[in-house]
Image: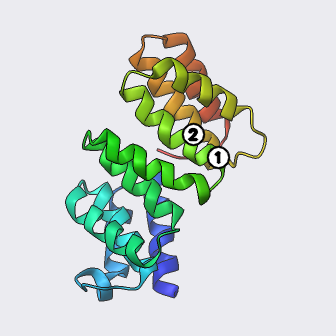
Amino acid sequence: DSAVKLAARYIEQGRSEGDPRFLGQAQATLNPWWNEPTPPPAALLLRATIRQNAHDFDHALVDLDQLLTVQPTNAQAWLTKASILQVQARYDEARRACQRLGRLAARRLRVGCLSDIGGMTGQSAKSKELLRQTLSDSALSGHERIWIATILAETATRTGAIEEAEQAFTEAYKVGIKDQ
């Protein structure tokens, strides 16, 4: 438990600072399980996250699939899987992973996940609308607000809506949480 908590903290610090050395420290913390075929589920999720950040997508997906076999209701695993599949332009599979969030997590996570894909696949207008609605949700955590606002900003940028992108990036920045 201590190693998993420390590795998670290193990953969080790496995201905050944008410094990949923290991911290396997280990996070192997980060393007892790094090459194990069946690590504990919490270590497996963190290993997949580190692999995702290192662009070792195929191994990260193997870890996530293994985790989802034993924990099919792990929302973070589905969200991470959707993100990797989107990066690989496997949009239909990514959408299916996002759909799994419908019963497992708050609606805003599913909307963010699907809107990110929609913004890449010709549904930018609908995606931006859903993201703007979601940003009005007072229940958003700071990290969720940054995530949703950034998806909106990136979608707006791709459609040439530069002022809207600037407003969304400003909204993310105003949250006051350092998140690269």
Q: Residue at x 32, y 56 (%)?
A: 53
Residue position for label 2: 111
Q: Position of residue 10 (x, y in %)?
A: 45, 68
Q: Residues within 10 Å of mark 2 (few under 14, many from 20)?
A: many
Residue 129, placed above or below residue 48 = above
List the residue tagged with mark 1: 107
Assign a secondary structure to mark 1. helix
| Label 1: few (<14), some (14–19) or many (≥20) C-alpha neighbours in 10 Å | few
The quadrant holding residue 137 is: top right
**Residue 32 versus residue 36: which sits nearer the camera?**
36
**Seen in the image, is 71 located left or right of residue 62?**
right
* Nearer to us in this view, 25 or 89: 89
Q: Nearer the viewer, residue 8 or 161?
A: 161
Residue positioned 78% across, 40% down in the render: 138
Residue type, label 2: Val
Q: Nearer the viewer, residue 131 or 166?
A: 131
CB within 8 Å, label 2 to label 1: yes
Figure quadrant of residue 89: top left
Whether residue 162 sits left or right of residue 143 in the image: it is: left
Q: Residue 52's x, y, as percent?
A: 31, 57
Q: Does residue 18 appear in this view?
A: no
Q: Position of residue 173 (x, y in %)?
A: 60, 34
Tag 2 secondary structure: helix
Residue at 71% across, 45% down? 140
Given the image, on which type of amino acid does mark 1 rest? Arg
Q: Is residue 176 visible?
A: yes
